[in-house]
Image (tube, helix red, strand yellow):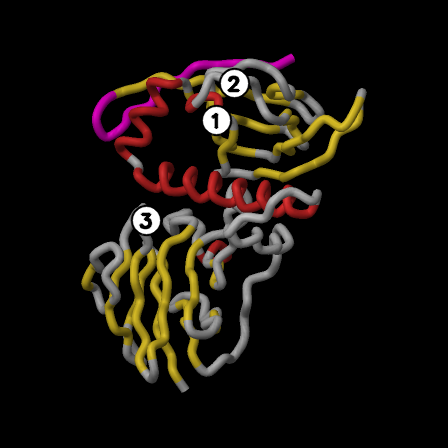
Amino acid sequence: MTQKTVFKTTGRKSASRHNIVELEPGEWIFREGDLGTEMYIVQDGQVEILKTLGEDQFQQLLVLERGDFFGEMALLEDLPRAAGVRALQPTKLLEINGSTFDQMLRENPEIAVRMMRALSRRLRETDALVRKLGGQPSQAAPAPPMPEVGRSPRVGNGPERLVHNKSGMEFPLAGSETTIGRKDPVTGIYPDIDLSPVDQQRSISRRHAKIYRRGEKFFVAEEIGTMNGTFVNGERLETGVPSEMKPGDEVRFGVIETRFVLE
């Protein structure tokens, strides 16, 4: 049976109360068609998003892990749940109601940005499905294929790369544009450089920054909604404003210190 406990947390503006929901493997958080007024953030464990195919038959759409969220649509519109969610392993969830959700959006812009990206991806997937079933095509581009969850970081000896100062791990740039951050199963977007293996403090945003190559020059720009900052040689970047990187420059994403290498 689902166990709920309440604890008090102190935010930057005021104290707030949240529910912690603990579940055993196989236990449902909610089922497709249920009414709901809460969203959830995974604190520990894993959950699966399931679409009902028939009696006791389900299609797994997605697996979410620590740091991912779901159920946000119940806070944005008064409609039944579009899919069910079930725990895959012992799981702890943070349950958020409407008032707390509003405060979170005001204090943490990355949450709003991630939600918009998730909605954008769902629209592309729906459009692709309609065209596949013979409906009218639209101008929207089809959704990109989702990379395999838990894929290994790209490590190697590319000519342009970031080198993690502490571990020496190397992250080759992808080409003319390289995204940097942490994998995001919620939106299905995975960065070209996933810094999760060296970011034990989870200081990197899901989409933290992007490196551009323009001719022989390289630039880094911080993404909208990024938390904890991006720095070149100790100077914090202004969000969305590219800053040139030169070989040997120290580039910090959150607390992760790297060096730009060009050979």
User: Does 234 sit above or below residue 117?
Assistant: below
Mark closer to the observer (2, 3): 2
Residue span colored magenta: 1-14
Residue 226 numbered tag: 3
Q: Position of residue 83 (x, y in %)?
A: 62, 27
Residue 79 numbered tag: 2
Which circle's residue, 2 or 1, is located before the other in the chain?
1
Mark closer to the observer (2, 1): 2
Amino acid residing under circle 1: Met
C-alpha separation, residue under disc 2 versus residue under disc 3: 31 Å
Asked if disc 3 and disc 1 are in contact, CB closer than 8 Å, the reply is no
SS assignment at label 3: loop
- Residue depicted at x 65% and y 26%: 86
For the C terminus, the quadrant is bottom left
Residue 74 visible from this viewpoint: yes
Near mark 2 (Cα within 10 A), the count class, few <14, some 14-19 or many ≥20, is some
Circle 1 residue: 73
User: Does 83 sit above or below residue 168?
Assistant: above
SS assignment at label 2: loop
C-alpha separation, residue under disc 3 versus residue under disc 1: 23 Å
Amino acid residing under circle 3: Thr
Magenta stretch holds residue 198: no
Residue 163 visible from this viewpoint: no
Q: Position of residue 136 (x, y in %)?
A: 60, 44
**Quadrant in the picture for residue 49:** top right
- Identity of the residue furthest to the front in this view: 136
Near mark 3 (Cα within 10 A), the count class, few <14, some 14-19 or many ≥20, is many
Asked if disc 2 and disc 1 are in contact, CB closer than 8 Å, the reply is yes
SS assignment at label 1: helix
